[in-house]
Image: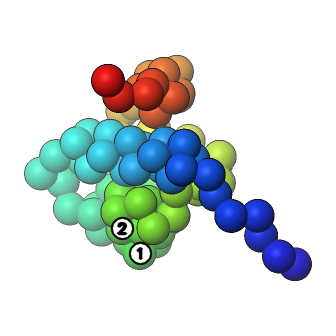
């Protein structure tokens, strides 16, 4: 199955998500947050660095919960186009 290439907007949104998760993680280790969310540290690393710009919904939901973020906040902050 061939995957449709991501648009620049989708890549930008993925980078915003990664930055937001990185900021929310603060001093916590990537391994600790990933374990709390039930995902691998490599998955979190890929999301934070923008290498996985379209992670699965349940992955994002689990990370948001582990970091104390609301899904509403994630949607609003990731959908914004920076000025």
Residue lying at the far bottom in this picture: please name it. 1
Give the camera-side residue of 27 and 16: 16
Left/right of residue 54 with respect to residue 5 in the rendered view: left
Q: Which mark, residue 12?
A: none
Q: Secondary structure at mark 2?
A: helix
Residue 24, position as x, y percentages in the image:
26, 40
Mark 2: few/some/many CA within 10 Å (<14, 14-19, 20+): some
Q: Where, quadrant-wise, is the N terminus in this rendering? A: bottom right
Give the camera-side residue of 67 and 23: 23
| Whole-number angstrom distance, CA of label 1 to CA of label 2 | 5 Å
Left/right of residue 29 with respect to residue 12 in the rendered view: left
Left/right of residue 45 with respect to residue 22 in the rendered view: right
Q: Is residue 66 something that shows in the picture?
A: no
Q: Determine whether 18 is above or below 4 in the image.
A: above
Residue 27, position as x, y percentages in the image:
12, 51
Residue lying at the far right in this picture: please name it. 1
Q: Coloured how?
A: rainbow
Q: Secondary structure at mark 1?
A: helix
Q: Determine whether 70 is above or below 11 in the image.
A: above
Mark 1: few/some/many CA within 10 Å (<14, 14-19, 20+): few
Residue 2, position as x, y percentages in the image:
83, 76
What residue did someone put label 1 on?
A: 42
Residue 47, position as x, y percentages in the image:
44, 60
Residue at (46, 33) in percent of width and height? 78
Residue at (30, 68) in percent of width and height? 31
Q: Is residue 50 something that shows in the picture?
A: yes
Q: Where, quadrant-wise, is the C terminus in this rendering? A: top left
Residue at (16, 46) in percent of width and height? 26
What residue did someone put label 2 on?
A: 45
Q: Determine whether 16 is above or below 44 in the image.
A: above
Do residues under tags 1 and 2 come within 8 Å of each other at their CB atoms? yes
């Amino acid at each position: 199955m061939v995957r449709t290439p991501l648009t620049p907007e989708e890549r930008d949104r993925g980078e915003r998500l990664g930055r937001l998760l990185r900021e929310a993680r603060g001093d916590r280790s990537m391994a600790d947050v990933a374990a709390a969310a039930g995902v691998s540290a490599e998955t979190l690393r890929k999301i934070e660095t923008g290498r996985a710009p379209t992670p699965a919904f349940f992955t994002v939901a689990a990370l948001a919960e582990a970091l104390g973020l609301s899904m509403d906040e994630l949607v609003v902050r990731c959908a914004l186009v920076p000025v």
